[in-house]
């Protein structure tokens, strides 16, 4: 009996001691799992950043010939008379769009998951708000160009006419408001999706308990739902800040940053310098400063929001 | 404090009938248990009383005022959830204070009342902690405190003890009962544990598949189950139930052909019901109401032992009825001192005054004909 047990135990142990299994055991398996992601990050983030960093120290132009020029591009940046306006535009654009993205996204999520009791109505409504995100950017931008058309055929102007008001040239008179709305409308769906999922994962008993304890619907939102959405709120805020800092495609398509740089943001300015006027070196320097600003903001936000505790919570 | 009345209360989810035409009266200050197996509609009933679910049909009265259209926050109920539902982002103090803060109680009074109720539940030293830092039993007390602190008219408890270990459950059972009597709050306890229901409540409402089966005192429920469901559900080990044939003149024919003479009052009662000769009835015998005899007796039935288990203070013996031990199975509780061996032949002597009989429709035949569908009188504490 005992011998039989020992033999079986040996049979289990045996394969673990061959040279092959010993090699396998020493093989750093965890790196194998990390490798794909590491490759992605290196190829698509670190390599471009380093190339960009190098580029920023050169005077490369359309001819693609280049020489190292030291800090010349950065000096030029500091002396560029447009930079204060670009920086101010960026600040206004990012903070206003961010507010729309977070607050309106939260509003939509609460509306469709908490206040609308019928599951399928909420779902239909949320899907509707996802449409702009599913539409190719060019098509979405075209829609806005039509809506803000300065003639009486633009949608907004048609509405004005219905009230007997003269047509407005939206994009030239309110370029900043236009790009904030364009990005806010498409960006709100991101927050909406994250917040909806988070609200749906709140145990329904918390909400029932609050109601029995005397909370109105708004009280439930204020005292139970919002505190439990703390982490999703922080995540969406950080994420959206960073992606807004780097985004310019809708602005490029709708107002081109104009008129007269009034809706031109940092990343768009870098794009223009590099690809429109062919000053690759200078464009790279502008982009480098933006990357530095973004990294500082990201670190600050994670610090303020207690990223480490967030990670602990997930464990 | 308030009395509660449910009239034709029905709740359907799509085509699932969770609660079916429930009628129930609960007196002011009474402690009532809703007892039934999982999924029988207990929580649904409770949530309708709290105002979380809207009844599909029927009415709910608090003190003779219909509260169907009253919002949960205006019903003054305290509810302890099956899951406790303590807010994870608040300290124990804030959890308990939450209902008071919502109704704008002055700060000093909140402080006083929270400490008072925490003292009552012996959790004063836990007030600074978060719910995640508490044991199940402590969480249960916090949930109870949160329900009690606003001095509700009605206290609703949804399986508050199901997450506790056996010892703690017994202690908490006694504590809740004491607290309820002390405060005199009308209380409804939902549970699937019959011991909990029978030991704590003044009256027990047994539910099955959304339908009320019987609503009476624990003693009545045990001694006079109204139908087969209650008979089989109440009692541990469960009641023995097997089919018998009715014979005119006050006899029942047991499987195997032997006859059981019914005591005179019972025989007369059956006579009054004009049962057909040979009608199939169900006989119920609690395991504790069966005597074992080593020798043949005229009132006894032969049976063969096929298993004996020791249950703490009792010995539970499983039998097969009949001369050859081929009849229906039967359990009897006996003294653990008694020696029984497998295959042993014994005579079972049922206590004639503790027989239960159910008709073909599953309803008890023991109630007087005019006593049928009894409306029990509320028991005042
Ligand atoms: N929101 C709901 N939607 C659909 N069906 C439901 C819903 N809530 C309950 N039910 C159904 O109604 C019936 C009664 O449910 P209920 O929660 O009242 O049972 P219970 O007696 O509390 O059971 P348990 O002891 O398991 O808690 C069940 O069949 C359940 O599946
Ligand atoms: Mg339940």
Image (cartoon, coloured by chain):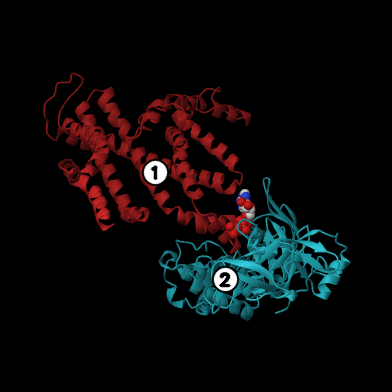
Tell me: A252 left or right of B207: left
Asked if residue B230 can be seen in this view, the reply is: yes
Q: Does A84 sit above or below residue B27?
A: above
Circle 2 chain: B
Q: Quadrant of residue A275?
A: top left
Position of residue B26 measured from the top left corner of the image (x, y, whole percent): 72, 70
> In the displayed structure, does residue A185 sit left or right of residue B320?
left
Query: Drawn colour of chain A?
Result: red
Relative placement, left or right, of A11 versus B153 is left
Q: As drawn, is B226 to the left or to the right of A296?
A: right
Q: Which residue is mark 1?
A: A95
Residue B248 - label: none
Residue beneath the point at 63% across and 79% down: B181
Given this view, does label 2 or label 1 mark the residue nearer the observer? Answer: 2
For mark 2, what is the residue?
A: B316
Q: Which chain is cyan?
A: B
Label 1 chain ID: A
x, y (%) of residue A161? 60, 28
Regarding residue B77, the answer to whether it shows in the image is: no
């Amino acid at each position: 009996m005992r011998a039989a047990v020992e033999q079986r135990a040996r049979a289990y142990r045996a394969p673990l001691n061959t040279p092959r299994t010993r090699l396998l055991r020493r093989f750093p398996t965890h790196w194998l799992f990390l490798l794909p992601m590491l490759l992605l990050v290196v190829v698509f983030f670190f390599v471009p950043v380093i190339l960009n960093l190098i580029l920023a120290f050169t005077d490369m132009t359309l001819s693609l010939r280049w020489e190292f020029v030291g800090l010349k591009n950065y000096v030029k940046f500091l002396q560029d008379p447009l930079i204060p306006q670009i920086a101010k535009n960026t600040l206004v654009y990012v903070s206003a769009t961010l507010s729309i993205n977070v607050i309106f996204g939260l509003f939509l999520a609460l509306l469709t998951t908490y206040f609308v009791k019928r599951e399928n109505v909420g779902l239909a409504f949320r899907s509707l708000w996802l449409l702009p995100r599913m539409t190719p950017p060019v098509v979405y931008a075209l829609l806005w160009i039509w809506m803000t058309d300065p003639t009486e055929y633009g949608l907004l102007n048609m509405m004005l006419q219905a009230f007997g008001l003269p047509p407005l040239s939206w994009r030239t008179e309110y370029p900043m408001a236009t790009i904030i709305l364009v990005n806010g409308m498409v960006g709100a769906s991101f927050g909406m999706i994250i917040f909806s999922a988070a609200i749906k994962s709140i145990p329904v008993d918390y909400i029932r308990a609050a109601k029995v304890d005397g909370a109105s619907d708004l009280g439930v939102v204020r005292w139970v739902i919002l505190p439990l959405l703390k982490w999703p709120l922080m995540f969406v805020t950080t994420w959206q800040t960073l992606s807004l800092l780097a985004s310019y495609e809708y602005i490029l398509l709708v107002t081109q940053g104009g008129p007269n740089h009034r809706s031109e943001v940092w990343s768009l300015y870098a794009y223009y310098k590099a690809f429109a006027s062919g000053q690759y070196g200078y464009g790279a320097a502008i982009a480098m400063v933006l990357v530095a600003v973004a990294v500082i903001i990201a670190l600050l936000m994670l610090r303020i929001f207690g990223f480490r505790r967030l990670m602990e919570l997930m464990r | 404090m308030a009395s509660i009345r449910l009239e034709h209360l029905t709740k359907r989810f799509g085509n699932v009938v969770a609660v079916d035409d429930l009628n129930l009266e609960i007196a002011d200050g009474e402690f009532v248990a809703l007892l039934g197996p999982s999924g029988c509609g207990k929580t649904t009933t409770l949530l309708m009383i709290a105002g979380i679910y809207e009844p599909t049909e029927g009415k709910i009265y608090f003190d003779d005022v219909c509260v169907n259209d009253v919002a949960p926050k205006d019903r003054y109920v305290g509810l302890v959830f099956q899951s406790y539902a303590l807010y994870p982002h608040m300290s124990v103090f804030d959890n308990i204070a939450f209902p008071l803060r919502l109704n704008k109680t002055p700060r000093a009074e909140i402080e006083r009342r929270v400490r008072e109720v925490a003292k009552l539940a012996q959790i004063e030293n836990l007030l600074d902690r978060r719910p995640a830092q508490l044991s199940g039993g402590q969480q249960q007390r916090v949930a109870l405190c949160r329900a009690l602190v606003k001095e509700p008219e009605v206290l609703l408890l949804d399986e508050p003890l199901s997450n506790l270990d056996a010892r703690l459950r017994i202690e908490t059972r006694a504590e809740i009962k004491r607290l309820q009597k002390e405060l005199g709050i009308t209380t409804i306890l939902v549970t699937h544990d019959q011991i909990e229901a029978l030991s704590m409540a003044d009256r027990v409402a047994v539910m099955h598949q959304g339908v009320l089966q019987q609503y009476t005192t624990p003693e009545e429920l045990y001694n006079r189950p109204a139908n087969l469901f209650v008979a089989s559900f109440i009692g541990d080990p469960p009641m023995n139930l097997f089919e018998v044939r009715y014979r005119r003149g006050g006899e029942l024919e047991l499987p195997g052909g032997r006859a059981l003479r019914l005591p005179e009052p019972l025989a007369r009662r059956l006579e009054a019901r004009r049962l057909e000769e040979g009608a199939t009835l169900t006989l119920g015998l609690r395991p504790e109401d069966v005597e074992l005899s080593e020798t043949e007796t005229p009132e006894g039935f032969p049976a063969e032992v096929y298993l004996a288990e020791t249950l703490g203070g009792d010995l539970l013996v499983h039998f097969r009825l009949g001369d050859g031990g081929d009849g229906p199975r039967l359990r009897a509780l006996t003294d653990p001192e008694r020696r029984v061996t497998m295959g042993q032949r014994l005579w079972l002597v049922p206590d004639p005054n503790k027989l239960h009989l159910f008709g073909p429709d599953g309803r008890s035949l023991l109630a007087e004909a005019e006593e049928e569908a009894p409306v029990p009188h509320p028991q005042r504490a």
